[in-house]
């Protein structure tokens, strides 16, 4: 996959804002995006109009950092922002449906984008607490790696009606699969060989379970997508886990009790955490076998569940 190029369009509001844009640009570069920024590429006496025109070529993506000042300058056609807006508007008139421009919001309490970007979905970087979440979305868009890849088109269940004379709906793996990257699962672990899948694509985890004690259950690494697992007993919440590297991944099976957490690593190197909420055993005063767990998958390829 070729490294994408992204031109950074922003206004020089103040030194703090320039520093934030520089930090964002440097991180994009370190993550495989050829981000083009004036602070890297222009020096005293440089040709500013030529730099803007070349950088705003529709062969590149453009990230518009829409602060309040940037939006005001773009709407009024002022300064370098106004000149860049004129170039971008001309390109947009040729193809109104393009995803060429990505607006992001920063230092913009009213979340207003320039008029020529009205209607485009933007990333909201106003709140530093949500930076990692917004950054991951931006990076995935630039690298064309969607968080939820579209599955392959399946076959109609009615396709064999002429052959059989009746339709038989058999339990499929979909019944034991939650493609979301966080949630709460409840399933009968005596079915489907104790397997329940969470996530999808590179972020798929086929968790495998079997009954243990009255308030515990066995977790296994036996699925083809799982590389290793670890048991966590010292944290009350998944969000308390800062570094998964501190745990022991040496065993094929672990036995968490209610409240305990299991860390899973799949063969693509991603981590997921499952916290046991409830366990029911048919042989221990229950009408059926059932496991309930909360789960979170780290989609940003880190080892920190606290963010």
Image: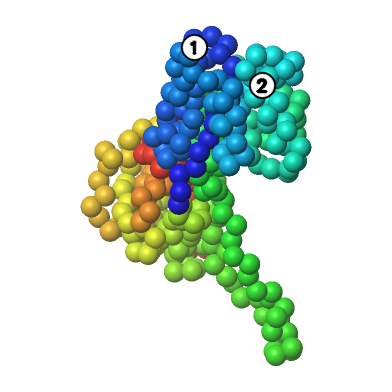
Toward the top, the furthest residue is 14
Q: Nearer the viewer, residue 4 or 27?
A: 4
Toward the left, the furthest residue is 250
Q: Is residue 286 above or below residue 143?
A: below
Query: Is the Cβ of the residue at disc 2 closer than 8 Å to that at disc 1?
Result: no
**In the rendered image, which quarter is residue 23 located in?**
top left
Residue displayed at 46% across by 48% down = 2
Q: Position of residue 203 (x, y in %)?
A: 46, 52
Q: Nearer the viewer, residue 178 or 38?
A: 38
| Residue that label 2 marks | 83
| Residue that label 1 marks | 16
- Labels 2 and 1: the sequence-earlier one: 1
In this rendering, the label closer to the viewer, 2 or 1:
2
Relative to 247, 187 lies left or right: right
Q: Secondary structure at mark 1?
A: helix
Asked if residue 98 shows in the view, the reply is yes
Asked if residue 134 shows in the view, the reply is no
Residue displayed at 62% across by 18% down = 80
Residue displayed at 42% across by 34% down = 29
Q: Position of residue 207 (x, y in %)?
A: 42, 58
Q: Secondary structure at mark 2?
A: helix
Q: Position of residue 108 (x, y in %)?
A: 64, 17
Residue displayed at 39% across by 60% down = 225
């Amino acid at each position: 996959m070729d490294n994408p190029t992204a031109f950074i369009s922003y206004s020089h509001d103040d030194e703090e804002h320039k520093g934030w844009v520089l930090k964002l640009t440097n991180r994009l570069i370190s993550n495989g995006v050829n981000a083009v920024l004036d602070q890297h590429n222009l020096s005293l006496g440089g040709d500013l109009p030529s730099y803007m025109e070349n950088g705003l070529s529709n062969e590149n993506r453009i990230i518009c950092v829409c602060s309040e000042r940037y939006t005001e300058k773009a709407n009024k056609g002022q300064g370098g922002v106004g000149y860049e807006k004129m170039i971008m508007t001309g390109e947009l008139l040729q193809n109104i449906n393009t995803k060429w421009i990505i607006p992001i919001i920063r230092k913009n309490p009213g979340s207003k984008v320039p008029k020529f970007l009205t209607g485009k979905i933007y990333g909201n970087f106003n709140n530093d607490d949500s930076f990692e979440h917004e950054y991951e979305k931006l990076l995935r868009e630039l690298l064309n790696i969607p968080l939820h890849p579209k599955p392959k088109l399946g076959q109609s269940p009615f396709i064999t009606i002429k052959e059989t004379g009746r339709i038989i709906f058999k339990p499929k793996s979909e019944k034991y699969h939650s493609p979301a990257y966080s949630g709460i699962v409840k399933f009968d672990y005596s079915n489907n060989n104790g397997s329940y899948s969470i996530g999808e694509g590179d972020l798929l985890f086929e968790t495998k379970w079997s009954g243990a004690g009255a308030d515990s259950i066995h977790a296994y690494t036996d699925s083809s997508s799982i590389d290793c697992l670890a048991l966590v007993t010292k944290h009350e919440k998944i969000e308390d886990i800062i570094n998964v590297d501190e745990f022991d991944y040496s065993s094929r099976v672990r036995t968490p009790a209610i409240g305990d957490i299991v860390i899973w690593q799949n063969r693509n190197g991603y981590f997921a955490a499952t916290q046991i909420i409830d366990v029911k055993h048919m042989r221990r005063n229950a009408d059926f076998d059932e496991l309930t767990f909360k789960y979170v998958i780290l989609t940003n390829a880190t080892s920190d569940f606290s963010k």
